[in-house]
Amino acid sequence: QIEATVDAYLEGEEFHKLPDVPPSPLKAHGLEVNLVSYSKGKVKSMPGFDVIKRLPSFVWLSPAASVGSEVTFTVDLITSPGCCVLMNDDPEILDKDLNFIRYLEEINGLFVYETKGESLARPTAATFGVGSGKKLHRRDLSLDRPGLMRIMSVDRPELRGGLMKRFTTVDASKEVVVVVDPYSTGCLVVQEIQSRGYKVIALWTKGFSEEMKTHIPLHCGTMSYHAEVSEGDNPGETQRELYKAAGALRIVACIAGGEAGVDTADVMSERLLVRTNGAKGVFANRRDKKVQQELVKAAGLRSIRQAAGKTISDVEDFLRKESYPLVLKPTDSAGTDGVKLCHNYEEAKDHFDALFEVEAVNGGYNTEVLCQEFLRGKEYVVDTVSRDGEHKTMAVWVYDKRPANGAAFVYFGMLPVDSGSTEAKLLVNYCHKVLDALALKNGPAHVEIIMTPSGPCLVEVNCRAQGGDGNWRPLARRLAGGYSQVEATVDAYLDKKAFQLLPKMPPSPAKAFGQEVMLVSHAEGQVIGTPGYDIIKTLPSFVSMETGVGIGSYVEHTVDLLTCVGSVILVHDDKEIVDKDIAKIREMEKNNELFELKSKSRLMNAMSTLK
């Protein structure tokens, strides 16, 4: 067109020689390729562009990004990172080059981004909707906040029946159980205790926030207690207040209702002369992640290389010499509060300093930071319950983590592991030895383990039941045939005979099929409709869904747990039905059919090379 324009004005004879239409077939094959970004970040280098320039059909390249610029997800021409022209006499070579460019885009090979401290948070009750800005959906924790939705199946009677009934051989009405910091799954434990006729005293530890006291799973309704007691200035004072609250009732157990209550439960159970894990010597800090690794190492088990300190000088040598990435976290955090993956010394130092400036999730401030090697391998969870040193495994789970939206590790779900499998046997054997090393003789444990090339290695032991508001309980009970960690915990403390009847391992094969599906968003925008929810509720294996995303929420591309948009529990007797329902959810995610998003007004500009 350029030459013909000049001919039209200046060379009439040459213009008349030009054909009226282009030749057919064309003399070569080619096209302009608009590049697509499936990730975002600040550009550190552009290796994919160098590769494109070496393709046999490459003609020219016009990047719309450069080192130091910010790249975002491509949703229109404005957010395209550039374009290129390909041309070749051989159409097969052209197609091969085009497919290779699309492959580079899909694996996020166009750019290398500047690294940031990545969150290694694992799924918890607070996962689905906790955001760090006004645009993000927020996960509300308490009953008086309407943002959180929990949708239950109303036509699955098999989920409500067939559970093991528990009866005590004593007059439970004359006895009371102390539960320390009952929140999340701890509320289910309380209600299970109450269902057996016992009264419950809630003991709230010092520094436990008022907000966390309202962290009650929606399916628990309103919690009520025989009495509520605040921890005193010393164990003796707390003990006196508990006896005063119990009155004529006999205190028969003292149980941790959540991570924050573990240390106090150990101390008070010892003083109250009830079943205890003890709190003497090094075991007074059993919840400390650094202490856990030291005890495991002393027992001759695989443990994490680590260093801890109150100042950067305490860990300087470790941070300088150890291979990156490294994991940094508070030694006494609740769950995954403050856990980060850092890729170099500068990032590690910044996060180390930041951890002393932010308030912990349960109140108070961090006093020491733990720096650890980054374990590579599949991530598992073993849920156990123990009584007098006898450990019984309630369930073994594995996290389904995959690349998505430019992030390397996005949680897609939590799947049960067959207890008869080789991996389960290895994990359980190692887990029980870890419990022995920590002298965790009584009560529940939620043990996180990575299966490394050299075998299982402890991440951390949570000396309480699995969290997540107990949303996993209906699934666990169906898989096991009528019991879960919640019932077994109460058995361990209050019903010796019932605990003895529990199997040491879950049944193999399981009594049903199912998993927890974590919802992944592949789009972003303001939600004006949730058509995907209506479809999910009709799936044959649907049990429940929990999400903080509703009409008016703003969703982003899911790249971590903070941007996860919800959780769905599926269970059914037929594996094919479960697999089909999972595939349907994934299809809706991929096609952006979970939500109807508000349309954005965008300029219809063509590609420009102007900077």
Image: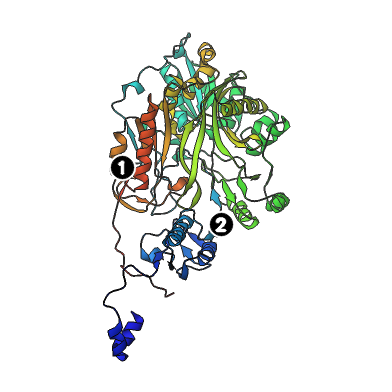
- Left/right placement of residue 289 relative to residue 465 reads right
Q: Nearer the viewer, residue 455 or 346?
A: 455
Location of the C terminus (image quadrant):
bottom left
**Residue 335 appears at what percent x and percent y?**
54, 38
Crowd rating for badge 2 (residues with CA inside 10 Å; few <14, some 14–19, many 20+): some
- Left/right placement of residue 62 relative to residue 593 reads right
**Residue 385 appears at what percent x and percent y?**
55, 23
State whether residue 575 appears in this view: yes
Location of residue 72 with respect to 60 vertically, above or below:
above
Disc on res. 115: 2
Under tag 2, what secondary structure? loop
Mark 2 vs 1: CB contact within 8 A: no
Disc on res. 502: none
Location of residue 411 with respect to 283 vertically, above or below:
below
**Residue 371 appears at what percent x and percent y?**
65, 46
Crowd rating for badge 1 (residues with CA inside 10 Å; few <14, some 14–19, many 20+): some
Disc on res. 532: 1
**Residue 170 appears at what percent x and percent y?**
48, 9
Location of the N terminus (image quadrant):
bottom left
Location of residue 288 with respect to 498 vertically, above or below:
below
Q: Earlier in the sequence, mark 2 or mark 1?
A: 2
Quadrant of the image occupied by residue 450: top right
Residue type at numbered disc 1: Gly
Q: Nearer the viewer, residue 56 or 373?
A: 56
Residue type at numbered disc 2: Thr
Quadrant of the image occupied by residue 585: top left
Q: CA distance from mark 2 to mark 1?
A: 34 Å
Q: Nearer the viewer, residue 150 or 577?
A: 577
Under tag 1, what secondary structure? helix
- Left/right placement of residue 509 relative to residue 220 reads right
